[in-house]
Each structure stands twice: as C-alpha cells, then as structure tokens.
C-alpha cells in the first residue's frame, strides 16, 4: 500500500456502549488506496479504519470507530397464552434465547442502508421463558473486523401480530430461514420442542427481538460492496439480579467482595504487626533508661 498511516487517541474518548475512539489518520494518496483490511496498532488497540467519508487524505482527517457491543434493556411482559395449534411460534423457525439458554453464537445478514431500509437488514429472534416484570438486558457483540451498525428492538406478541409492517418483516425472515438459514452448523436447534404435549392453559412471557444490521464501511472490493458478508455475532440475554445489576456481573461482584474482605483482614494483621513492633521499640527504650 502506498503512503503511510499513523494514529493517536485524541482527547474526549467516547464512553458507553456506543462510544468510540477518535483517531487521527494521516496518509499519502487517496481513500481508494486503503482497503478494509488496513489496520493500525496503537497502544494495544487494533484499529480498523473507517473511511467512508474520506476523499483526499493528503491532509489530516478524523475518523470515529464505533464500539463492538450494542444492548437493549427491557422488562419481561405479562404472561400470555401461547397457541398450541398450528401455526405456532415453533413454526416460525426462529432461534431463541431464554434465561436457561442465554447465549447464541450465529451469523447475521447485513446490508447497506437504503431509503426503504434505513437501518439495514432485519433479523428476528425469540426471547421466551421470561419473568413478568423482571428487568433483562440483551446484548449483541461482534468483531471489529466487520464494521457494522446494529439496532435492537423488542416487541410483545400482540404488537407484532397487529402491525402489518412488523408481521410482514417477520414472515419474510421466517420464510428465508426455511430455505437457507444463516447459522453455525454446530448450533443447537432454535426453539426446543418439548417431548410432552403442552397444556393449552400454559402461560408464557415471550418477546420478539428484531435486530437491524447495517454495513458500516467502504472498500474498493466490489464483491463485498455488492454482497455484504454475514456478520459473526454473539447474542446474550442477561437477567438482572433483583432488577439492579446484570447476572453476568455476579462473579465480578463476588470477587470484589472477597477482595474487600481479604483486604480488611490483611489490613488488620498488618496493623497488629505494626502495633507489636512499636511496643517492642518502646520496651527497648525503657530498658535503656
């Protein structure tokens, strides 16, 4: 590649899940000389250049690199009676998450934003076996090698079935999965089908999760521009403990508590040792007198 690239972190580091690093990119030539795979290592960060708005970069330009995690926080909806006669939720062939099976590793289709799809390609998932009124967090994580903008929306069942736009999007996605689902070969089945027949009076707290994926890069590779490759992601459903903090933070909290208790005992022991040392010095001084 002609020219050279340097990067440095500028003041005002972006915070939060949608935060980013402000990177100053200096190079010789034009943006067309930079490929998607061009990277900069700086301070332990592997920065993938995002230069969709750069034209002539013979001067300094500032690029913003988005974080690789997006999340949504919601409350479990009221329990509803889920139909047991066909068509059922299982017939939608959606991948599902629950507090018992809380992580999903899969590929998500992405697309460049258009006038008809401003947020990119829509994918649908099922969040089931929730608790009414309990706080949950759903996160999606992806590698920086595939710059993508994600948007997460959750809907209860009546909202989706009563909205023509949402039900059409869900039907199109479900039909596409019937003929060619994009998923990992070793991934377990989407919604576990119970061996025993469900009771028609069974109630379930269930939500639909809609994930929009918009490709967020520019490359001179026309194949990638015309056919956006699927994005490898982890989707995580994280219940809140007492509706205060996510369950995934419980090991960290336990570690901090143990560290604090250990520090307290250590401080007490060190304090006693210093007291004994001071008493010994005082006794020596008395003997000298």
Image (tube, rainbow, N blue to C red):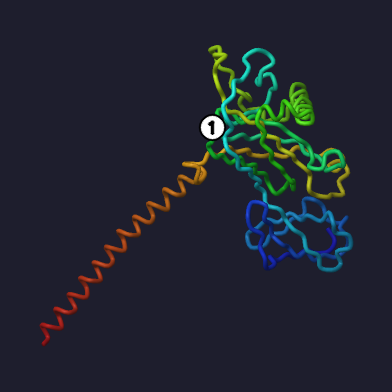
Residue 197: quadrant of the picture? top right
Which of these two is toward me, 154 or 54?
Answer: 154
Q: Residue furthest bottom?
A: 289
For mark 1, what is the residue? Answer: 132
Residue 122 x, y percent position in the rendering: 76, 35
Residue 33 x, y percent position in the rendering: 86, 56
Residue 200: quadrant of the picture? top right
Q: Residue at x 70, y 67 (%)?
A: 10
**Quick check: 9 left or right of 78?**
right
**Quick check: 229 left or right of 97?**
right
| Secondary structure type for disc 1 | loop
**For residue 275, above or below residue 140:** below
Q: Residues within 10 Å of mark 1 (few under 14, many from 20)?
A: some
Query: Could you tell me which quadrant the N terminus lies in?
Result: bottom right
**For residue 194, above or below residue 262:** above
Residue 263 x, y percent position in the rendering: 35, 59
Q: Residue at x 73, y 33 (%)?
A: 123
Q: Residue at x 27, y 67 (%)?
A: 271
Query: Could you tell me which quadrant the C terminus lies in?
Result: bottom left
Which of these two is toward me, 283 or 153?
Answer: 153
Residue 288 x, y percent position in the rendering: 12, 86
Q: Residue at x 19, y 78 (%)?
A: 281
**For residue 30, above or below residue 182:** below
Which of these two is toward me, 79 or 169?
Answer: 79
Please count the marks in the image.
1
**For residue 273, above or below residue 100:** below
């Amino acid at each position: 590649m002609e020219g050279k690239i340097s990067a440095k972190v500028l003041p005002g580091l972006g915070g939060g899940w949608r935060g980013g690093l402000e990177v100053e990119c200096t190079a010789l030539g034009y943006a067309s000389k930079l490929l998607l795979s061009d990277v900069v290592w700086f301070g332990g960060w592997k920065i993938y250049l995002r230069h969709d708005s750069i034209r002539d970069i013979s001067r300094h330009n500032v690029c913003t690199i988005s974080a690789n995690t997006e999340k949504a926080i919601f409350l479990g909806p009221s329990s509803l009676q889920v139909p047991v006669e066909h068509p059922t939720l299982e017939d939608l062939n959606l991948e599902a998450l629950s507090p018992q099976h809380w992580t999903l590793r899969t590929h998500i289709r992405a697309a460049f934003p258009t006038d008809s799809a401003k947020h990119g390609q829509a994918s649908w998932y099922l969040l089931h076996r929730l608790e009414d009124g309990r706080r949950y967090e759903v996160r999606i994580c992806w590698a920086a090698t595939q710059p993508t903008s994600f948007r997460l929306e959750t809907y209860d069942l009546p909202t989706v079935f009563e909205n023509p736009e949402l039900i059409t999007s869900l039907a199109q996605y479900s039909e596409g999965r019937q003929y060619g689902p994009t998923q990992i070969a070793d991934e377990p089945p989407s919604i576990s089908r119970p061996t025993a027949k469900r009771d028609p009076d069974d109630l379930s707290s269930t939500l639909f999760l809609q994930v929009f994926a918009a490709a967020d890069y520019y490359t001179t590779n026309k194949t990638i521009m015309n056919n956006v490759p699927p994005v490898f992601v982890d989707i995580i459903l994280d219940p809140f403990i007492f509706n205060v903090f996510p369950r995934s933070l419980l090991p960290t909290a336990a570690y901090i508590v143990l560290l604090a208790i250990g520090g307290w005992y250590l401080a007490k022991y060190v304090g006693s040792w210093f007291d004994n040392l001071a008493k010994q010095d005082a006794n020596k001084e008395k003997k000298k007198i």
